[in-house]
Image (spheres, coloured by chain):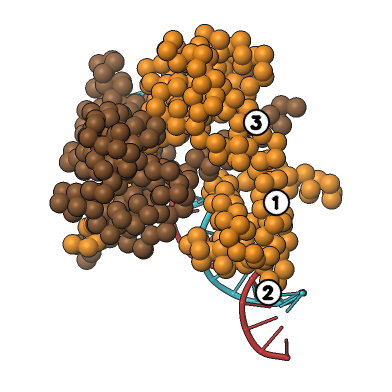
Chain colours: A orange, B brown, C red, D cyan
Amino acid sequence: MVDERKDLQNIKPIPEPTLRRLPVYYQYLKKIHNERKVDFISATQIGNELKIIPIQVRKDLEITEITGRPKLGYNVTELIKRIEDFLGWNNVTDAFLVGAGNLGSALLGYNGFKEYGLNIVAGFDDDENKVGREIGGKMIFHVDRLPEMIRRMGIKIGILTVPAAYAQDVANTMIKAGIRAIWNFTHIKLNVPANIIVQHENLAASLVVLSKRLEILLQAQK
Amino acid sequence: MVDERKDLQNIKPIPEPTLRRLPVYYQYLKKIHNERKVDFISATQIGNELKIIPIQVRKDLEITEITGRPKLGYNVTELIKRIEDFLGWNNVTDAFLVGAGNLGSALLGYNGFKEYGLNIVAGFDDDENKVGREIGGKMIFHVDRLPEMIRRMGIKIGILTVPAAYAQDVANTMIKAGIRAIWNFTHIKLNVPANIIVQHENLAASLVVLSKRLEILLQAQK
DNA sequence: TAGATTGTTAATCGATTAACAATC
DNA sequence: TAGATTGTTAATCGATTAACAATC
């Protein structure tokens, strides 16, 4: 009975909104940890700074199984550690990026992903001018070598920054070679088998939200 | 009484998930409209293709106030038009982009935004090598000219693709000059007045969702 | 001690999903 | 006509928010 309850707890799905807020807390915690020398921080303080109500903060942090102290709040160092543990940022996962254009180069050059548990080990492109060179410190290989290298290195995550027209083909190649999750930066909705994860960075969707909010704001002021 | 009800309907907030799905429907509708010559499409067909349950599709499309025909579905041309109207994609809004690095260049070079009602009219940077040149067909101005040009052209949307260290400063400049909405591609949470809209393209948050889903998938298969 | 804050249970809110009569 | 599909109302589900005893 007791064991069963524990099992259910572990299986309990993590709310996606909570998941998305955790890195926001994390960034803030790192900042105050560096800037001021505070040992403890309350959900109220975090909430004030990030404009999230304190109850929400407490509920979100609960998922890391941290225990705070009434009146004091949470130990900053411990909280940072807990979030890292919960999100698995200790053991970094390797990824390949395909499409070393402007967007791809931007991602290759961003060194912050390692902090979030992702290591882009190499880039791929079909442009012979790029193959063999380094972009953002990462070697660029010809896209023909993609399947072989995915297999050999056991890569599970692929980052897709190719032109829209090639997106589905490259995704197919990735999946056939063993990629299990695709971070899709193209404007195409990918067609993939049910057991493949696609995280679509859909700028059109974001833009729609931005525009509507602006429209409402401007109308309210007329 | 009747009028009051109508007012309330207009004020009725639009669910953000619906808003984000509309461009997905739109892209698909455009595709089938070009490819095959079908006049009508049902929520069932749309749902099958996009892996969204039909009721969800119907509920989402309801917001555009389209009326479908039982047995037949929706008129494709009309539906496309309705979504365009609802999202205000007919009258394009101008925007400035600040930070013409790799990411900024990728956005400047993407011509698809116009289709979604956004026109990036110019870029800004502090790199003298870039100032005066064109990137992706858009002229790059020195960032010193940003306030003056925002005022003169009455620009309301700013796209932020500068290095994290400059993000808050540039945002402040934008807001002071009259920008009302910021599309934030930096890794920094911006501090802005309550009446300014920030749409934060938070890659860390997306990455966290991707990683957790992959973790769960891989664990389930062990 | 008094008061702020946690942890936890309950209430509310909004989005998703179901049900079903109307209809082409 | 029969059956698929819409439009609409109701039920369910999950996330947010509230309430409050425990506590440092």
Q: Report the quarter where the C terminus of chain B lies.
A: top right
Question: Can see residue B33?
Answer: yes
Dot 3: element? strand
Q: CA distance from mark 3 to mark 2?
A: 38 Å
N-terminal label among 1 and 3: 1
Q: Amino acid at mark 2?
A: Lys
Residue at left 67%, top 14%? A152
Image position of B24 with respect to A177: above or below: below
Say what amino acid the circle numbered 3 marks. Answer: Thr
Q: To which residue does mark 3 refer?
A: A93
Q: Which numbered disc, 1 or 2, marks the residue that appears first in the sequence?
A: 2
Q: Which chain's residue wears label 3?
A: A
Dividing the picture into quadrants, the one containing residue A122 is: top right
The one of B183 and B123 positioned closer to us in this rendering:
B123
Residue B185 horizontal side relative to residue A198, left or right: left
Which badge, 3 or 2, is on the more N-terminal residue? 2
The disc at residue A90 is none
B212 versus D16 height, above or below: above
Mark 1, residue position: A82
Q: Are marks 3 and 2 in contact (CB under 8 Å)?
A: no
Residue B125: x and y in percent read 31, 41
Q: Judge by depth and name the residue closer to the eye, B44 or B96.
A: B96
* Chain for numbered disc 1: A
Instruction: Give the residue displayed 55% in from the left and 36% down from the top.
Output: A111
Question: Which disc number belongs to residue A71?
Answer: 2
- Residue B54 percent across, percent down from the top left: 42, 33
Towards the viewer: A163 or A34: A34
Q: Is residue B203 left or right of residue B106?
A: right
Say whether residue B135 is left or right of residue C8. left
